[in-house]
Image (spheres, coloured by chain):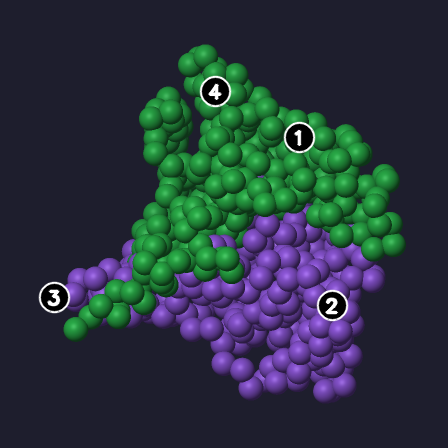
Chain colours: A purple, B green
Amino acid sequence: MKVLIVCAHFDAKSFNASLLETAIDTLTAQGHEVRVSDLYAMDFDPVTRPTDFCSPENPDHIRYDTEQRHAVETGTLPEDVKAELEKLLWCDFLILQFPWYWFGLPAIMKGWVDKVFAMGAVYGGGQWYNRGALGGRRAMLAFSTGCFPSMCGPDGINGDMDIILWPIHNGILRFTGFDVLHPHVSYSVNYKSEDQRRQMIKDYAVRLRGLSEEAPIPFNDREDFTRDWRLKPGIPAKSVGQIKTALNASEAKKP
Amino acid sequence: MKVLIVCAHFDAKSFNASLLETAIDTLTAQGHEVRVSDLYAMDFDPVTRPTDFCSPENPDHIRYDTEQRHAVETGTLPEDVKAELEKLLWCDFLILQFPWYWFGLPAIMKGWVDKVFAMGAVYGGGQWYNRGALGGRRAMLAFSTGCFPSMCGPDGINGDMDIILWPIHNGILRFTGFDVLHPHVSYSVNYKSEDQRRQMIKDYAVRLRGLSEEAPIPFNDREDFTRDWRLKPGIPAKSVGQIKTALNASEAKKP
C-alpha cells in the first residue's frame, strides 16, 4: 500500500507522536510505502483565503470552491496545497491522526481538508460518494481522547461515536469516494499509566498490521437514493446518517 | 440580550456578509446589544500552539487543555484569546455564522473554539453539559450551504442534519452549558436567484426577531446518566446522539 499519514500534534514527546512513529515503523516493516504530512512541523496554514488564488476566475467575488476548481484546471493552486494534493492522490490508504479537539478535528487539520480536498480534483461534476474521485482508496481516523469509552457508546452521554464521527466519515471521506475503516480510538489517554499507554501503542501496531483484512463501514450508495437524494422506498438505511428512517420504520411496524 | 456574533467569511460582498449585516441591524433595532467577532477581519490565528502559553505549567510536555486552565488561573492567556473569551463570557446569546465547509465549521472558526473555549473558563471541574460554565446562555448556528434541503433530511444522502450537527450542538455548545436553538440554515445559496437570496436574508431577520420565543433543542441532563455516563435504564433518549438506544428499545418491543 501507499500510505499517507496526516498528523496534527505539536509535541514530539506526546502520545500522538508515539502513535505516528509506531505507524511509520509498522507499515514500513510490512513493505508499505509511507509518506507523512506532519502539519505542525510543516507550519501548515489552515485558513482559506481569497489570496490563495493568484489568478482567480472571478476576482470581484471569490467563491472558494469554484476558485479551487479553476485553480486545479489552470495549475495555479498554492504550492503547499498542490504538494499536499499530490500526496493525497498518490496514496491508496489515508490515515488522519490527531488529538480529539471538541468532538472533531483540530483546526489545523480541518483546514488541511478545507484546502486540499479541492473541488475539481477530489469531487465535483457528479463525482461524489461511491462515485467520488478518490474511489478505490481507503481511509481511517486514528485519534486520542480525554473521555472514556462508555461516554461514547450508543447510550453514552457524549452520544454514539458513530454519530459523532458521521460528518467526518460520511461528509469528508465517503463523500470523496473513500472506503472508510472503523476509527482507531485511544481513549482517555491522560488517565492511563505509562504501561497502559505503551500497551495502547502496541495495540495500534497490531491493528495496523491487520488493516488489509478489515471490512469498511457500510454506507448506502448513490443509487439507493431518489433523484432528489432521498432514500428510495424499501431500501434499508445502512448507516447512522439515515437512522431516523430505521426508527420510523420500526415504530410504524408496531401493532 | 447581549449578543455575540462570530462570523467566518472573507468576502464583504458575500451572502454571509449580508446575513451578518442583517443580524446586526435587526438585533440592534430590537434594543439588543450586539458585538461581533469577524474572524477574517481580525486575522484570527486558529492554530493551537505551545507558544500560546508564555508561562506554561509544564514546559517540557505541553498539554493544551491543562495549560489553558493554568493560563486562565494565572491570567496569562494570549491577548487575542483573552479578548475573545471576555466577549464569550459577556454574551447571553451566541451566534456562530459561517459558510458550511465539509459538513462543519471552517478551520478559522474551529480554531476559535479550540482556543477560546478554554478549560477552566467554560468547562472543567465537573462543569459540563447542563452544569457547564456557560449555562443560562443560548446559542445558534447560522450557515449557508451548497447542498439542497432534501439531501439533509432524515432519509437524505448527506444524513440527517440533526446528526450532522450533533458534534457541534452537543459536543461544543451543550457541553459548555448552552441551550441550543435549532440552526438557521440557508440552503443551496449559489443555486438561487438574486430575488430568492434577498428573501432568504429577510427570512433570517424574521427568525432573529422571534428568537426569544423559541424552545431549545432537547438534550438529556447529566442526571439522566449512570456513574459511568450511560443512559439510566428506563430514561428515554431525548436527542439523536443516543438514538440507537431508542431504535433498540423499539425493536425489542416488537411482537
Gap in angstroms between the C-alphas marked 3 and 4 = 49 Å
Q: Are marks 3 and 1 on the same chain?
A: no
Name the front one of labels 3 and 2: 2
Q: Count residues near mark 2 (Cα–Cα under 10 Å), then give few for <14, some for 14-19, many for 20+.
A: few
Secondary structure of the residue carrying tag 4 is loop
Vertical order, B7 against A223 (above or below): above
Chain that bears disc 3: A
Q: Position of residue A92 (x, y in %)?
A: 62, 76
The CA span between labels 2 and 1 is 36 Å
Circle 3 residues within 10 Å: few <14, some 14–19, many ≥20: few
Lateral position of residue A28 relative to residue B116, left or right: right
Instruction: Characterize the local packing of mark 4: few (<14), some (14-19) or many (20 or more) Cα atoms within 10 angstroms.
Output: some
Disc marking residue B84: 1
Residue that mark 4 sits on: B1
Mark 1 is on which residue type? Glu
- Is B103 left or right of B158, judged from the image as shown? right
- Do badges 3 and 2 share one subunit? yes
- In the figure, residue B255 lies in which quadrant? bottom left
Q: Are marks 2 and 1 in contact (CB under 8 Å)?
A: no
